[in-house]
Image (tube, rainbow, N blue to C red):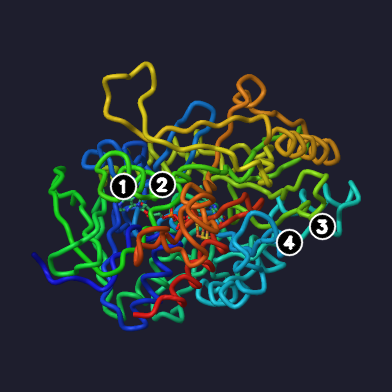
Amino acid sequence: MSKPFDVIVIGSGFGGAVTACRLAEKGAKVLILERGRRWETKDYPRDLNDAWIYDPNEPHKRNGWLDFRFFDDMAVAMGAGVGGGSLIYANVSIEAKPWLFKKGWPQEITYEELAPYYDRVGKTLNVQTVPDNQLTRRFQLMKEGAESLGYGGRFYKLPLAVTFDKDWSPDREDPFNDKHSKPVENAQGQKQGTCVHCGNCPIGCKVNAKNTLDLNYIPWAEKHGAEVRPLSVVRYIQSEKSGPEPGGYRVYFDRIVDGKLIPGSESARRVIVAAGSLGSTELLLRCRDQYKSLPNLSRFLGRNWSSNGDFLTPATYNNRQISPTQGVTISCAIDFLNEDENAPQFFIEDGGAPNALRNYLESKEPGVPPIPLARATVKALAELMGPADPFGNVMPWFAQGVDAADGHLYLGRPWYAFWRKKRLQMDWEIERSKPVITAIINMHKLLSAATGGRPQVPLFWTAFKSLVTPHPLGGCNMGVDATTGVVNHRGEVFGYPNLFVADGSIIPEAIGLNPSRTIAALAERIAALITV
Ligand SMILES: Cc1cc2nc3c(=O)[nH]c(=O)nc-3n(C[C@H](O)[C@H](O)[C@H](O)COP(=O)(O)OP(=O)(O)OC[C@H]3O[C@@H](n4cnc5c(N)ncnc54)[C@H](O)[C@@H]3O)c2cc1C
Ligand code: SF4
């Protein structure tokens, strides 16, 4: 048996990185167990054969960048790796609306209560907006759409966790080339570069201009003695009645070593579950229903899950260049979150996408034999196949909204695989969330029409009423007691002292806009209230 830690943190996304950092700062001996890799910029996936997919059922075989889960009427995208969703996210770091906390949240959590923690997150993530000389065509299109519909007052730039260089200009020769990135050192002493607007934010920033958690909170935690163990998949947690940490918890995990799973365990007086909305909910469901190691977990576990009302409508333009592969993935919003209980609440954003072809060709080139003919052939192919601006006339209109937050997660088997081990399942009924999704689509249509575009509402909605979300929320919701939630306002699990959940799974209602700043602020508060 190894020496116990003061705190074990499971997961290293917004909840995990923040709590680990602040508790290590307070002097606790912290261990972070993360199921994914510790990525280096040179290893970010670019080629078709690269490690894109994380398979939660066989993580020893596939432990790549993105965990994409398919349920009956919902698909969920999540990051996997040290830094969690920050590696893959679009950098938007925005506070929730003050009125949002009036309904469905424990009374202790108000905007005023969270305000200092929001500030702290904003400072640590060095949040800023895109400089005026670097605005994209997407930004201009959004602004024009908002103004022509009379919503100019609702349009604004979004706060982003990106390091910009005010001297960068799109008029430079080959402007998106990494060579234009300037080296900088951040407040945590980490080397970063400035943004060259290459559009690759969701597949990893090669110049480290994204202020991801592995460049701030996590190294700061390590500076204060925290240990990070990547490729460590936590399976279950057990209360320690005896052993080195009576009254604490033992965490059982599998380490991924050379394609194999090697079991291990560690114990600590306190455990913080921060494996994300789906990850934490599944882990606690397994503790309650499969291993029966935490049998008294609330019956509310898995209830009131939200997709945060995400929707994407691409629109095509005949005579207009939009260039969605250029610039940071998201930069601005038209805000319809206005506390009117009778109106659907939503938030429109511009959307970008990486230039997959350019990335693919660039990543292949180093592998081409150093023979002039081979190099010339690849170059010619790149010029033929790789237009600088693919999908140049498409505008991806994004949005999020306040949905009904009435999804249900549980362990089970689909009827067509009754022999299989139980997996995470989701019941999702669209009925109560339909008004907000319909309102979003209508606004996307109006904005497209106002700017001369033709909206293409995706078939998965028109035919199947299915949704895709990168913003899963809830599952281990905050509540007043075990009949209304799984954790209290401090993130502590009802019935299990010193066991905490700190991530998107504790958020009890849809936020209607990008949630990572709120998750991080709640994690800052949870860590502040723990005495080590
Ligand atoms: C493409 C994309 C773009 C996005 N853009 C934005 C944006 O611009 N702004 C925004 O606010 N949000 C954005 N999001 C959402 C954001 O990433 C999430 O809301 C956020 O990361 C959730 O934080 P979290 O702490 O709850 O979980 P996560 O950040 O997901 O962290 C959970 C961590 O736990 C690990 N884990 C899971 N299970 C286990 C286990 N059993 N053992 C050990 N480790 C485990 C995971 O690998 C992960 O690292 C985006 C998401 C995606 C997919
Ligand atoms: S646009 Fe490119 S350089 Fe800028 S933050 Fe995104 S990935 Fe990094």
- Residue 36 location (% of width, % of height): 30, 52
Can I make out residue 174 in this image? no
| Residue beneath disc 2 | 281
- Proximity of marks 3 and 2: CB atoms separated by less than 8 Å: no
- Pointer 3 residue Cβ closer than 8 Å to ligand 1: no
Q: Tell me the CA gap for discs 4 and 1.
A: 36 Å
Q: Please state if 476 lies on the left or on the right of 263 as rendered.
A: right
- Proximity of marks 3 and 4: CB atoms separated by less than 8 Å: no
- Residue 3 location (% of width, % of height): 13, 72
Quarter assignment of residue 132: bottom right
Q: Tell me the CA gap for discs 3 and 2.
A: 36 Å
Q: Amino acid at mark 2?
A: Thr
- In the rendered view, would you say 323 is above or below 514? above
Nearer to us of marks 4 and 1 is 1
- In the rendered view, would you say 479 is above or below 283? below
| Residue beneath disc 3 | 154
SS for tag 2? helix
- In the rendered image, the quadrant that contains the C terminus is bottom left
**Badge 1: how crowded within 10 Å, few (<14), some, or many (20+)?**
some
Task: Mark 3 or mark 2: name the one nearer the start of the chain.
Answer: 3
SS for tag 4? helix
Can I make out residue 93 in this image? yes
Task: Mark 4 or mark 1: name the one nearer the start of the chain.
Answer: 4
Q: Amino acid at mark 4?
A: Trp
